[in-house]
Amino acid sequence: MRTTSEAPATPSAIPLAALATEAASCTACGLAEGRTQVVFGSGAPDADVVFVGEAPGAREDEQGVPFVGRSGQLLDRLLAEELGVERSDVYIANVVKCRPPDNRDPRADEIATCRPYLSRQLDLVDPVVIITLGNFASRLLLDTGTGITKLRGGDYRYGDPPRHLVPTFHPAAALRGGVGVLADMRSDLGRARALMTA
């Protein structure tokens, strides 16, 4: 696993920071009006694995960091137990960077407006594996209308050069759906781990 603890800046760290600065002042869609701050992304700028979620929630909007609520606590646990890594070893981002009002689903126009930021993040980090968390990230990056229940369990190709993309449930679904959803997530992360070390 690549980390950034030994050097102050990797080749992708500065471009990512510049992109984050650009995103911080974005007013391209209506979500900018209600945000506390942009939740750009966090983690290792040259990580082997990138997680892509849906949108910031209230805690993320307050702290400016993705996945810091209950879903984030579960994700941290799964990182340790299934991938053998810490949050600082991976990179985490969302499809949209600002919190939708009342935690509603992001709209198609908001996703389209924010997509260039996510695409650039993925290009800069250049991971071996992308793990999409839930319907919105999986459908966007796989360009499909198929839901996560049918998509998960597989290994897809994304980008050029092609990277592995492993869709799985959003941690919030595991918190709501119990043991079965959590078991599926563990299986998907195990698949990702095998791809990372192949």
Image (cartoon, rainbow, N blue to C red):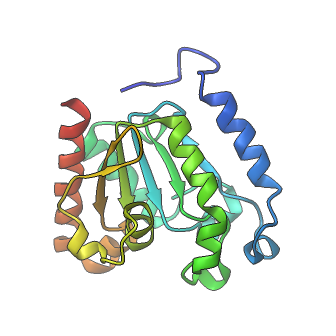
Q: Is residue 104 above or below residue 60?
A: below
Q: Quadrant of residue 27?
A: bottom right
Q: Residue at x 63, y 53 (%)?
A: 117
Q: Is residue 165 above or below residue 43?
A: below
- Choose between 154 and 9: the one closer to the eye: 154
Q: Residue 75: where, in percent of width, then height? A: 38, 55
Q: Residue at x 29, y 73 (%)?
A: 148
Q: Quadrant of residue 10?
A: top right
Residue lying at the far front in this picture: please name it: 160
Q: Quadrant of the N terminus?
A: top left
Q: Is residue 122 above or below residue 172?
A: above
- Choose between 109 and 19: the one closer to the eye: 109
- Choose between 10 and 107: the one closer to the eye: 107
Q: Residue at x 33, y 79 (%)?
A: 176
Q: Residue 71: where, in percent of width, then height? A: 43, 65
Q: Is residue 129 visible?
A: yes
- Choose between 2 and 84: the one closer to the eye: 2
Q: Is residue 35 left or right of residue 16?
A: right
Q: Residue at x 64, y 18 (%)?
A: 8
Q: Residue 78: where, in percent of width, then height? A: 30, 51
Q: Quadrant of the C terminus?
A: top left
